[in-house]
Image (cartoon, coloured by chain):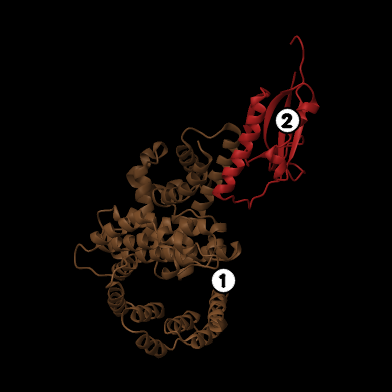
Chain colours: A red, B brown
Amino acid sequence: MKDFMMLFHSEPNPDFNPTPEQIEEEIKAWQDWMEGIGTQGKLKNPGEALGFEGKTMHANGTITDGPYAELKEIVGGFIIVSADSIEEAIKLGNGCPALSSGGKVEVRDIMVFDGM
Amino acid sequence: MDDKRLSIIFKSEYSNLIAVLSNYYGLKDLQLAEDIVSETFLKAMKAWSHKGIPEFPKAWLRKVAQNLLFEHFRRKKTFEEKITPELGARTQQIGEIEITDKIIEDSQLHMMFVLCDNKLNKESQICIALRILCGFSIEEIAKAFLSNKETINKKLYRAKKAIKERNRVETNLTINQYVTRLDNVLRVIYLIFNEGYYSSVNEYNIRQEICWEAMRLSIFLSEHKIFLKQKIHALIALMCFHTSRLDARISGEKGDLLYHEQDKSKWNSELIQKGEKYLKLSAAGDIISKYHLEAAIAYWHTRDNNGKWNNILQLYNKLLTIEYSPIIAMNRIYALARANSIVEAIQEAHKLELKNNHHYFCLLAELYRMNNNIEKEIEYLNVAIGFANKKNEKELIKHRLEKASRLKTS
């Protein structure tokens, strides 16, 4: 078993003004999806949701507004799952609500260093 | 937590939070209050998606809204200059204040009396009340008005601007101001209710919710000691009687059914009883408002005895002396036909001469139908269909035309 981090990317939409029903649906969709991973015993860490505020520090000392440099997308949160392979981790990512709202899921392996 | 409850929490907290931000924290800009609440909701959506729904979701929302507000003040650096004088003694403890139900209730009441402004036009008034007092989304309001989001947003923007300009200094209303503005608030609740009850929209859920919200607001008002209760009770009675028939009313396939077309077994007897209770309460004292008369008329419609139509006719006569409107005049003529004579009613109807009102020609057609004059009935239905603007109104008249034509040929 290895650990993989899933990073959720979405395009920021300042005009997004969900109705109470849409909020409820969104929360439910995420909870259902995470529960699905959890019941398989593969949710290593439920991660964090990231806010909308952010700045980026650059090597030359400048600081720019926004958590995203050039890409028009923002990392909205992450979780850590356990899986035998990256293929299995990808399978767990299926049905992630970030995908159904036009976002992306980035799956990365977390490096393990034996004996450390 | 069952999933139905979550959206209800968001809906009720929308109006609660805006009321508290505006009243308790002295935030006079409605738009800013709305923005803070929207941001609070977005935060909730993200956080709850990942971390699960907190044990006390309302408290969570209130805390986050409060923090966002303070953050806003800090950013603006206006905290000291603007907020301190407003809050006076309360400022000392502002960071620790728990937003209690009592504070929310006071703020809601205050918000009602600031928002119900008799200088706003009817549609803007209903829009802003549905949005801020009842927490309806822009989409829902657009559906209720058979309109689109842009139009509703414009109406809301204008209403907010007008309220902001007029009510610049209204953070504290005196008891006297509350009492003198009660009629205004009742008028708005009445408009909200009618929007739900008479709406030509097929969205049953929204219509029902609008009716219930109007009832909730008036029951909320009736619980405050400072007001004379009679008019409020009369309005509640009126709404109970009407709402008792909402299921039966909307069960028609081609638009709303009128009293005599409805399946009486679908009438909600519990609401009728509640209506009777409030009607009795409203009779304490010597005030007779239009709500009293309309409630009494609605009461008689739930009855099935001999004197019914005569009573309804008398009530309409009184109502016309308090407030004239073509609809009331037409309803009175129908009651006249039922109570006295159809011929007399037809004569009176011709005197009304409401030239381009399709309801008027529908009434004439109905009176001739009652008088077994199918040709005249068809004639007036054909006139009516020319003046009907909405698709479902046209269809309803067409339906009646088909029925009449079938009778004629058989």
Q: Which chain carries label 2?
A: A
Q: Assess disc 1: are there few (<14), some (14-19) or many (≥20) residues with their C-alpha within 10 Å of its C-alpha.
A: some
| B349 or A21: nearer the viewer | B349
Q: Which of marks 1 and 2 is in front?
A: 1
Q: Residue beneath label 1, please?
A: B392
Q: Can residue B289 be seen in this view?
A: yes
B315 with respect to B259 (left or right): left
| B42 or A69: nearer the viewer | B42
Q: Which mark is residue B227?
A: none
Residue A21's spot in the image, x, y percent? 56, 48
Q: Does dot 1 land on a helix, a strand or a loop?
A: helix
Give above or below for A53 relative to B369.
above
Residue B407's spot in the image, x, y percent? 53, 80
Give the residue type that dot 1 points to.
Asn
| B59 or B291: nearer the viewer | B291
B339 with respect to A99 (left or right): left
Residue B198's spot in the image, x, y percent? 46, 67
Residue appearing at x 29%, y 63% in the figure: B234
Q: Residue beneath label 2, please?
A: A92
Q: Mark 1 lies on which chain?
A: B
How far apart are labels 1 and 2 at the CA level?
A: 49 Å
- Have a look at marks 1 and 2 and say if they share a chain: no
The quadrant in which residue A85 appears is top right
